[in-house]
Each structure stands twice: as structure tokens, then as C-alpha cells.
Image (cartoon, grey):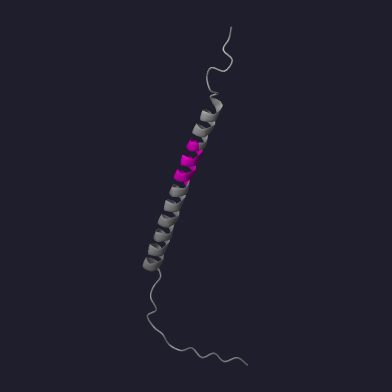
Amino acid sequence: MLPAHSAAPQWPRALLLGARRCAVRAALCGAGAALLLWVAAFAYGGFYFLTVPAAGLVAPVHFRFR
């Protein structure tokens, strides 16, 4: 004679394990994307301030339109 339900089903445990693994991957991908975005913004700002010259001569310019 076979036991009717001697052990709990294993699918809920496997489902929760998969969901936890997916959540960890999503958190790691989000953190990596945020880090890359921060590095890109910092590199852009550094490059911009190093390459764009400061205004050396400021003089009014008068245009004449006819």
C-alpha cells in the first residue's frame, strides 16, 4: 500500500528559491546599472571641465541689422 501524502510537495519551495534568485539578480543588475550611470556622469563632468576652456575675454558685441 502506498502512502497517500507522506511528504509535502516540493514545488512551493522550488518556486520560492527561483523567486529569491530572480530578486537577487535584479538587485545586483540594478546596483550595477546605478554604479555605471554614476561613473558615466562623473567621467562626463570631469571630461567637460577639463576640455572646455574658460571665458578669457568678455566684451560686448553690437550687431547692426538693417
- Residue 20 in percent (x, y) is at 48, 37
Looking at the picture, tell me which residue is in the foreground, 42 or 33: 33
* Number of numbered tags placed on the structure image: 0
Task: Name the residue rendered at 45%, 55% in the picture.
Answer: 37
Q: Quadrant of residue 58?
A: bottom left
- Residue 51 in percent (x, y) is at 39, 67
Q: Residue furthest top?
A: 1
Q: Give the range drawn in magenta.
A: 20-29
Is 11 above or below relative to 48? above
Task: Name the residue rendered at 46%, 40% in the picture.
Answer: 24
Is 26 above or below relative to 43? above
Task: Name the residue rendered at 47%, 48% in the picture.
Answer: 30
- Residue 3 in percent (x, y) is at 56, 12
Q: In which quarter of the image is the N terminus?
A: top right
Q: Quadrant of the C terminus?
A: bottom right
Looking at the picture, tell me which residue is in the foreground, 15 or 31: 15
> Would you say the magenta stretch is mainly helix, strand or loop?
helix
Looking at the picture, tell me which residue is in the foreground, 19 or 44: 19
Task: Name the residue rendered at 54%, 32% in the picture.
Answer: 15
Magenta-span inclusion, residue 28: yes
Magenta-span inclusion, residue 21: yes
